[in-house]
Structure formats: C-alpha cells, structure tokens
Amino acid sequence: MNDSGKPTIDDIARLAGVSKGTVNRAIHNKPGINSGTKERILAIIEEEGFSPNYHARSLATGRTETIGVLLPDVENEFFAMICSEIEKMCWEKRYVMNLAFSNDVPDRERAVVQSFIDRDVDGLIVFPVSQNYDAIERAIAAEKPVVLLLNDLPLQEASAVLVNERGGMETVVQHLIDAGHQQIAYIDGYVHYSGSYNDFINRERLRAFYETLERNHVPVDHGSILEFRPELYTKTEPAFLSRLFESPDPPSAIVCFHDRIAIWLVQALRDIGLRVPQDVSVTGFDDIRELQYITPRLTTYRVPIRDVASEALRILFQQLEQPSSIRQRVVLHGTLVEGASTIAAISLTPD
C-alpha cells in the first residue's frame, strides 16, 4: 500500500502473482491474457478497491480513453438510439463517451469540436452539419481520428459510416408501386434549412423517390411534394394537407422523409377525417423505437443503427491503433419493415 492506504498497481500485481503489464491488460481489456487470469485480477481489483490513476495512465499510454461524440439533436429519438449504442460499445471497451449536441448550428459545432480537442479526447464520432468542413478540419489538424456518421463530406482524411439512403427510399417506394399505388405523395424534411444536417439525406431520399417513380412509369406530380415544418409537430394544420386531398387525383399513399413525420401524419389525417390505411397508406423511414406504440404499426425502412455504431467504433479504434491506416467509407443497408399502415391500392375504401 502507498502512504494514502490505497492499493497500487504493484499491490494488485503482487496479490495476483502476475506482472504489472498483465494487470494493465486485464484493466484495459487487452489481448494476451487468458480469461482465468483476467477474472482473478479483476476480482482482486474489486476486493481491494483499486482505482488506476487517470492522469498517470494517460501519460503512460498517450490516451485519455475518452471519445467525443457530436450529434445534431437531443430530442430526436433516432439520435438517442445511435447515442445509446455507441455508449454501450464504448463501455465494453472501457472508454468513456463525451456527448454533445450541435443543435444544427455550425458555430456551436465548431465550439464543441474545439472543446473535444482541448480535452484531448482520443477520437471523434460526428454527425456533421452539412457542408461545415471547418470543424472537422480542426480535429484532423489536431491529429484526432474522425469518423463521420450518415453525412458525407468530401474530406479524404475523415472516415465515414453511411446508410444507403437512396436504396432504402427506392425499396419503400417500390413496395407501394408493387401494391398498385399510382398517386404517391412525399413529405420531405427541412429542405430550406440549407445548413441542416438533413440536407444530404434529404437530397438522397428525394432523388430516389423521383427516380423510382420514373423508372416504373408512375406519374410524377411535383405539387404532391410537401416540405414539413418543425412547428407542425406541436399542432395539426389541415391547410398543410389540403392541397393534396382537394386535388382531382388525391394520393392513395404518402411517403414520409422519416418516422417522426409519419407519426405526426397519421394523427393529422385522423383529424381531417381520413383513416390509415383504409383511405391512404403511409410509410416512414428509420424504424425508431417509438413505432411500437403507434397504431397502426408503421411500414418503414429499418436503418441498422447498431451496425452504424459498431462500424464507427471499429474504424475509430483501428485508426487509434494504426494512425497511418487508410480512411474508410462504409455504406450500410437496411431492410423494409412491413406494418399495417399500408395496404394494396385496390383495397382502399371507395368514395
């Protein structure tokens, strides 16, 4: 024991009958130690109340065992799901996740990234505000490995984990076309928020929507493309939907940019006297957990959130171990989840 009466790493090594290096491997979950020895060391650590000195460990390893994670929004459940998965995987590797939100504001993103650099995090996982290169370039200049999430920036030094947004939207729209729908509307994300993190994803999904209709020779009605406004989450505005359903050919199906819009839409349609799916089919995108509480169960495209988190961490840790490793761009694919919010067009309630 040292003068403070607290056990040191030398004490743990002596009690376990192993070297200090072996104790370090057990603490940091490193290879080169068998499971029995590791369990014995961890049991001794718990029994003796040993806590490795953080600053000494940082000086010895050159790492703080912290990762900065920057997401756009604290309220969006999609980001909460990503955050939860990253945190669990960080904990398994005995890393601490430092979490912050940009609120989709470039200046705030820059400030948070600089804060991560000042706190000497080992690496960063960032869902960047679209076209905001400055913040990411600062981290790269500070020799911090960076993995971008779900938003592609043309920076060769930053790796990226993306979802096949276009392929996912094609799958959703094709599902409706195959069910006989010919009048299909689309409610987009925040198109005019030019700095928004949604900008890249918006463009990918909307382009896929148009291309899938055209490929199947389904008429494209540009008047049936609506832009959802965030303030609509707190109220129902019949006028927002009126131009769709007052037209001579109202939609038999509506595709939503993401699940939160679709959840709002189901209620908004009820408020104007339309039923889902009997009068109009509705689809979402992402498959957030909240859908399990929604009736009818939404047809959506499931983004592989756990895979997004695991790939981001795999790449980040690989770059920590091999700083000269080639940056990676990984594109993941999801799956269609067929719910009860869509039916065949011939099954729609007649006028």
Image: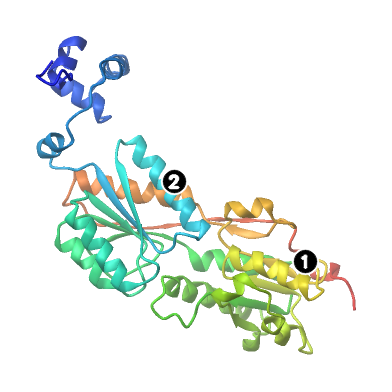
Q: Quadrant of residue 158?
A: bottom left
Name the quarter where the N terminus is drawn: top left
Question: Mark 1: which amino acid?
Answer: Val
Q: Could you tell me residue 76's position as x and y percent?
A: 50, 60
Outermost residue on the right side: it is: 351
Q: Could you tell me residue 8's position as x and y percent?
A: 15, 21
Residue 8's label in the rendered image is none
Tag 1: Cα neighbours inside 10 Å, few (<14), some, or many (≥20)? many
Q: How is the image coloured?
A: rainbow
Judging by the rendered image, the residue that carries numbered circle 2 is: 85
Question: Mark 2: which amino acid?
Answer: Glu
Q: Is residue 254 left or right of residue 107?
A: right
Judging by the rendered image, the residue that carries numbered circle 1 is: 276
Q: Residue at x 26, y 45 (%)?
A: 66
Tag 2: Cα neighbours inside 10 Å, few (<14), some, or many (≥20)? some
Q: Residue at x 20, y 21 (%)?
A: 23
Q: Is residue 290 left or right of residue 42?
A: right
